[in-house]
Amino acid sequence: MADSLLKAVDIHKSFAGVHALKGVSLEIQPGEIHCLAGENGCGKSTLIKVISGVHAPDSGCIEFDGKRLEKITPIDAIMLGIQVIYQDFSVFPNLTVMENLALNTELAQNHKVVSWKRMRRIAQEAVAKINFDVDLDALVATLSVAQKQMVAISRALMFNARLIIMDEPTTALTRKEVQALFKVIMQLKSQGISILFVSHKLDEVFEISDRFTIFRNGELVKTGLTSELDSAGFTYYMTGREFTEKKFIPETIGEQPLLELKGLGMEGAFEDVSFKLHAGEIIGITGLLDSGRSELALALFGIRKADKGDILIKGKKVDIGSPRQAIDSQLGLVPEDRLTEGLFLPQSIADNVIIAEIDRLANGLSVVDRDKRAQEVDNLVRRFAIATPDSNNAAQTLSGGNQQRVVLAKWLACNLDVLVLNGPTVGVDIGSKHDIHAILQDLACQGMGIIIISDDLPEVTQNCSRVIVLKGGRIVKELSAQEADERQILSHMM
């Protein structure tokens, strides 16, 4: 094996008595794509911050290019060629692409007067390194998530990057954008640049990485060649649990539809969408980003109003023009972005899970019954296995998977008939993903009608009894569970 570019050896790190890293090690070769995987809270982010100089390890050492680093600051790491691209990309949304790319160079070279000509040249050279075609004068706030990511990568390469750490780089990307990112990553690899790819998505790990390292509860559990690992083994090492993959088959399907759409349309988004959802069913709706799938979810919940067609709940035509009307019709929505749309992050877990049923817990004077509230919170936290030592803690203290459980608990407290979930497991780890799927299947078996809107095709094929494919705002195919394999779905999506 070639000399390592990076070695992290026996790293320990604690925060206020919590042992985040328990003697973990990581080794990365030059020009290697290395996947660092593990569930939320396993220590991945802590190790990244140790490598990049944000945190000093309590013990252990970091070696880079054969030299032991006694002390390292973030600036030292950048000068060595270590670049971290976090999930938020750390770009300035109110500045142009050119300013985002050239500003650091201008500051580093201590120019007293800004030269727009010089800045444009710097930015042009930066985007040319990955053949990134973008308007340099566009505000970064106006770019797509994928374009912001490419800006961050272009900026990283300006400082002679030798190791680029990408923290969950595909969380908010479409399938097409993921493939474009992978093409850039392979290009960087061909230039001898090493990539530490932090992810918990199995398909991506196997597609892009040469070697892997898996953490669990702050400890190293497995490292090796990706080619020598299968998905079952990967899942086991990450979670310590073995899962049986089987397709969801409804136990009983109600005769009368809980929800029926007849020619539903919204100008510029989707057109002539018709289907029925029965009690006990889980229907999957999938399509590319511009297929109209997210707009359909918003229309069903009344956030955006459909301008054509009818919505029927239990055979009765309803007018859903607001979320309140949707809830009154016993229909709930788990939104695509739980952080900004599904949760009150600074508020307590308890407040979040009971917010939708607050009226039911109040007495005749509109005062919430504290005992009833406490009992309901305890029941919901236990039922959905929300991992928290105290339900009075803020929702933002939870992992992504547990935050999603809070959103589910909030809606299930309302005794809904229909639950629509837009991207239900985006950004959650493998164990939580399986648990959330099990919850949804159990709810369907209890008589709820569920719609999963997702471009995660394994999620759709494993959990849905029928799959509806949208393209250009129209239904192009409806597939039964037996027909709905990934290749078949993709052929209609594309």
Image: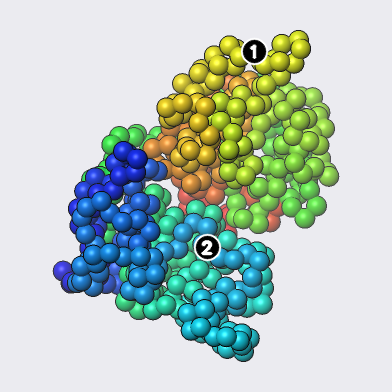
What residue do we see at 33% from left, 74% from top? 80
> Is 47 placed above or below 422 here?
below
Disc number for residue 90: 2
Q: CA distance from mark 2 to mark 1?
A: 44 Å
Quadrant of the frame with the N terminus: bottom left
- Considering depth in this image, is 172 or 112 the residue closer to the camera? 112
Rendering coords of residue 121 (x, y %): 56, 87
> In this figure, which residue is indicated by the disc labeled 1?
369
Identify which residue is drawn at 63% across, 20% down: 415
Q: Amino acid at mark 2?
A: Ser
| Residues at discs 2 and 1 in contact (Cβ within 8 Å) | no
Q: Is residue 490 above or below residue 306?
A: below
**What is the secondary structure assignment of the residue under circle 1?**
loop
- Image quadrant holding the C terminus, namely bottom right
Report whether 58 appears left or right of 291: left
Amino acid type indicated by mark 1: Asp
Determine which of the numbered discs, if any, sits on residue 187 in the image: none
Q: Is 434 situated above or below 295?
A: above
Q: Which residue lies at the image location 19% right of the left edge and 72% below the top edge?
A: 66
